[in-house]
Image (cartoon, rainbow, N blue to C red):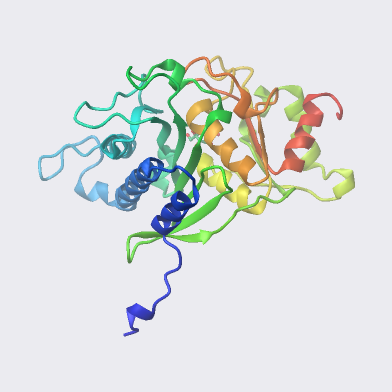
Amino acid sequence: MADSSQENIGITISNHLLLNQQLSTGATGSYTRLLQALVLACKIIQRDVAKAGLVDVLGRAGTINVQGEEVQKLDELANTTVKRRLSASGECCGLISEEEADIIEIPRQYPQGNYLVHFDPLDGSSNIDANVSIGTIFSIYRRITPATNDMDLQDALQRGVEQVGAGYVIYGSSCILVFSTGQGVNGFTLDPSIGEFLLSHPNIKTPARGKIYSINEGNYSYWDEPTKKYIDYLKNGYAEHKTNYTARYVGSLVADFHRNLLYGGIFLYPADLKDPKKPHGKLRLMCEANPLAYIVEQAGGLATSGRERIMEVEPRYIHQRTPLIIGSPEDVRLYQEFVEGRRS
Ligand code: P6P
């Protein structure tokens, strides 16, 4: 049996956060405690996701299990987990969840902090029964209203450029946490044998151009003309690169985004001109587009709605949707040439 004292486990996320804090002048530890609460929430969600396939053995979600407890649906469970951990951190003044219509107040038994978090507790959860990777996405802001009042919409509806941090966890063949606090992007892989996230992807930079495009081609007839022309162009092998792109689409945002971030390429969820439910696309500005835009720009990529930089979109309401075109800078710039009529 190897002597575990000699084992080099590398840098844990706790080491990374505390080092970051020491290097940040004036840091009080508040932000670190918030991130540690998020890390704990993601470990709990990973545990629940990992056994989700067994829920059938114990009774399907939404039923009563043998212990007489209601088996919660996984996304409800994930939502409750993030709310509880962030509230208990004492560092938040309010939360906004993709699962809930309104701002979530922090229970009075906890201190009210200076941060607010938009989050999608379990994006892509409809894929869980097929064991497809799903994820948690989060976006962190500092409150801008006086701490003496309750948090309000002014705090919740800040543009993406005001984020002080963002990230996601992908629950897949391994559990990887990718986040940035404004000094680059780092990825940490959970080692279940010690229950720690270890630095596995330091200083992620996305390739300038990829060979992957990710879009739901079933919606082709609903796209605007520039999007149709751009995808047709990629599929017909465009001149200067003399290469065809390859289509990769999981249908789980975090899985598609994470693959393209590492390998290069472009993900598109454009507006749907025929579906009155999706005139601005399907994805949410505050808890999906903005956090991934923050990450991709920190990794050297770009994110646009087609009309403007995602992080400059003015939020009008908390569950606002937006078209999202995101990925390698040269790919997103080429898409923009079609949108602006500079290429057809
Ligand atoms: P479509 C999952 O339901 C989700 O919200 C994202 O994770 C994913 O990118 C998108 O919807 C897929 O949508 O319309 O292609 O099935």
In which image quadrant can residue 116 be found? top left
Question: How many numbered circles are shown?
Answer: 0
Residue 62 sits above or below residue 49 on the image: above
In-front residue for pair 204/263: 204
Q: Quadrant of the C terminus?
A: top right
Q: Quadrant of the N terminus?
A: bottom left
Image location (x, y in percent) of residue 179: 50, 46
Image location (x, y in percent) of residue 162: 54, 29
Image location (x, y in percent) of residue 168: 47, 44
Residue 222 visible in rendering: yes
- The reply, left or right, for residue 63 in relation to residue 74 is left
- The reply, left or right, for residue 216 in relation to residue 334 is left
Image location (x, y in percent) of residue 180: 52, 45
Residue 119 sits above or below residue 296 on the image: above
In which image quadrant can residue 326 be found? top right
Residue 284 visible in rendering: no
Residue at x-position 73% and y-position 37%: 332
Residue at x-position 45% and y-position 42%: 26
In-front residue for pair 28/300: 28
Residue extending furthest toward the bottom = 1
Residue at x-position 59% and y-position 17%: 279
Residue extending furthest toward the front = 26
Residue at x-position 37% and y-position 40%: 30
In which image quadrant can residue 93 be found? top left
Residue 333 sits above or below residue 107 on the image: below
Residue extending furthest toward the right = 239
